[in-house]
Image (cartoon, grey):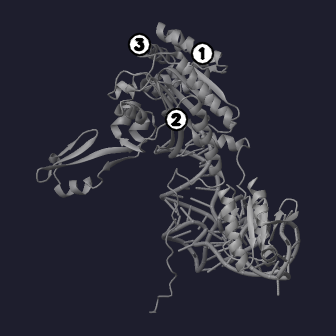
Amino acid sequence: MSEGAAKKEEKPRKFQAIRGTRDLLPPETTLWNRVEQTAHEVFATFGFGEIRVPLFERTDLFARSIGEDTDVVSKEMYTFLDPPAWLEIFEKRGNVKDVDRTETTFTIKNHLPNEDFIAEVLSLRPEVTASVCRAYIEHGMQQLPQPVKLYCIGPMFRRERPQKGRYRQFYQIDAEVLGGPDAPGIDAEVIEMVMTFFERVGLEGVQLGINSIGDKNCRPKYVELLRVELLKVKDKLGPDSQRRIETNPLRVLDSKLESEQKIIEKLPRIADHLCKDCAEHYAAVKRELHLRGVKYQENWRLVRGLDYYMRTTFEITAKGLGSQNAVCGGGRYDGLVELLGGPPTKGIGFAIGEDRLILSLQESGKGVAAQGRDVYIAWMGEKAYAAAIRAAKTLRAAGLSVELPPVEQKFGKALGQADKLGARYALILGDNEVSSGEWTLKTLATGEQQKLTEPRLLEFLKKL
RNA sequence: GUGGGAGUAGCUCAGCUGGUAGAGCGUCGGACUGUGGCUCCGAAUGUCGUGGGUUCAAAUCCCAUCUCCCACCCCA
């Protein structure tokens, strides 16, 4: 070693999860599985089938459906080019004129002889409705019996500032009904389904708010009326709301500012300005909810931020979630499939924020404890080890959770381990057991022990 | 993107006005070579988030930066 080699070894820098992402660890993952399993079960009883779609799509799929001007599209998507080497190629050529840039592709002309270099613009999905509609169109699902009922569980990605219940990689449980007639019963059934699901998972403090935001006939007129009224009181509003008068008047209704509440209460309400069809549809949805025993609160201020929503909108809140207390949002989007190049198709769906659902369940004590073992096998000696392996195999085949220590331990230590792991039984296998043929089974909670022959003991445990 | 709070052992945190680190819990080992939960003893683990500055001396003071938390904006 040369002089100066005595320096501290440089430790590799520790890696950590990217901002806004996180690891889900046991035992919490058990709760996630329980929630998802419940979704599978409940949704199946309503005739929904699971669809799994890619985590990324062409950017313009999202842009077109969600709306070019929404924050989600304009600044919150994780967007990249495929293939990613376009930049190097671009720099080598150094000629802007040869690059043809569109919303969806970068084309470099004559990159190779007779070959253009085309890079597609892709994005990680910020939500999944657009993908499901794309799949509906791509697989000709309009040929299936209508409506088509689908659900999808998985991660979404938005580059937002993290806060309570809001992450950059977050999970949604999403359901969509595509096609079929213009029947309010579909809206009501979708809402009934999600409420059933929440009841089944034990979510507390659930409140359903509903509203109708009209369609392309009546909504624009209402928005214009709202804008006019808002301009009259503009100087009484905060800067955010003032800005929204221009960008999205509907969102002023969402304002949480205490000082604006009285003003907002006096604004015109869309329920009074719905066209005949929309008004009838809304009334029918409420009637249908009654028939299904679903309790709701009308919330005329409930609007949706995404462009594609129309008529029915709804939102479900739960407790223990801080300022991000919505655990599910949804609504009708009849024009979306057509907008994406498919046939005219009705659509309605919802998305449950799974992270928030889990959070709320944990806050109200519905979390889960660490999974214990059914049997801890305390063995000592070569012969006992062979018997232990045999026993573990049999018990596991019977579906029991078995811990088989890989190295020999003194019995005191083994029982200590069994205790820490929350085992129900300890199967004690030592020289005595091997020679007598009678195995010892200890019930950890009571300390009771019994001696049983191998077949009888396995029989006994398999009945657990 | 904006504002506020916080980063010290695996976890929860102490460390006053500068003198180069502690507790509890947990982990591992032992007291206890065939019997756990209790008790007792012992051990390991930190570039005090990171980088720079002031100083004889920085976990402590100053600046920057990163990350986390909460809220805003936005939003299922």
Would you place residue A436 above or below residue A257 in this image?
A: below
- Tell me residue B4's x, y (percent): 61, 48
- Tell me residue A212's x, y (percent): 52, 17
Q: Label 2 belongs to which residue?
A: A174
Foreground pick, A99 / A363: A363
Residue ID at (11%, 50%): A114
Label 2: which secondary element:
strand
Give left or right: position of A453 versus A45: right
Residue ID at (76%, 63%): A455
Q: Which mark is residue A217?
A: 3
Determine the CA span between mark 2 and mark 1.
22 Å
Mark 1 burial class by Cα count in 10 Å: few <14, some 14-19, many 20+: some
Q: Circle 2 marks a residue in which chain? A: A
- Mark 2 and mark 1 lie on one chain; the one further toward the N terminus is 2
Q: Circle 3 marks a residue in which chain? A: A
Residue ID at (28%, 45%): A120
Label 3: which secondary element:
loop
Determine the CA span between mark 3 and mark 1.
24 Å
Determine the CA span between mark 2 and mark 3.
28 Å
Kind of residue sitting beneath label 2:
Asp
Q: Nearer the viewer, mark 3 or mark 1?
A: 1
- Tell me residue A259's x, y (percent): 61, 25
Label 1: which secondary element:
helix
Q: Label 1 belongs to which residue?
A: A288
